[in-house]
Amino acid sequence: MEQLHAMLEKARTDKEFGAKLEELGKSGAQPEAIIAFAAENGFTITAEELNSCGGDCAKCGELSEEDLENVSGAGATQDRYDPNECPTRTRTHYYCVGFLSLVYCDHLRRRTVQQSPQFRFRYICDKPGGFNYIGNSDGEPKYDYTGNL
């Protein structure tokens, strides 16, 4: 897991490297392609490590629960809004969180609404016509804004 953390840190600090990972993510690259890219750049990671994150870097220790609560904070976000893609979505998607949830969109808001028996979060895209729903930690919808689903 240490190598994965090092690779993700490099993606944060090296714009070219981060852009290449971003392209892999946008293309829906399989773990083997990501592992090969990592190896080409001196990192040894496994499919198990990638899968253990499951796209949720809080599980990898990259973002704390507090960071996730405040995804609009400096350094962990950027304007990822795509006017062709985003208006068609009714829930979080790649453009909201980026590759392995490294960089959240400035327009995404996530707030805890229920902590037990399971965590529930309100996900809001603050762009006009954006989504507003309650879901679990990986963004899977559980309720719409009225509490129904």
Image (tube, rainbow, N blue to C red):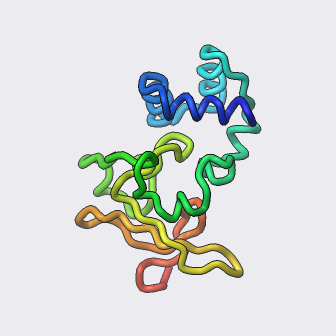
Q: For residue 35, what is the image quadrant? A: top right
The percent position of residue 140, horizontal first and vertical second, equals 55, 64
Side (left or right) of 118 relative to 13:
right
The percent position of residue 19, horizontal first and vertical second, equals 43, 28
Q: Residue at x 59, y 80 (%)?
A: 114
Residue nearest the viewer, comparing 149 with 123: 123
Q: Residue at x 53, y 72 (%)?
A: 121
Q: Please say whether residue 92 is visible from this viewpoint.
A: yes
Residue nearest the viewer, comparing 63 with 41: 63
The percent position of residue 146, horizontal first and vertical second, equals 42, 85
The percent position of residue 91, horizontal first and vertical second, equals 43, 62
Q: Quadrant of the N terminus?
A: top right
- Which residue is at the far front? 74
Q: Residue at x 48, y 23 (%)?
A: 17
72 versus 29 height, above or below: below
Q: Residue at x 47, y 25 (%)?
A: 14
76 versus 135 height, above or below: above
Side (left or right) of 62 relative to 125:
right
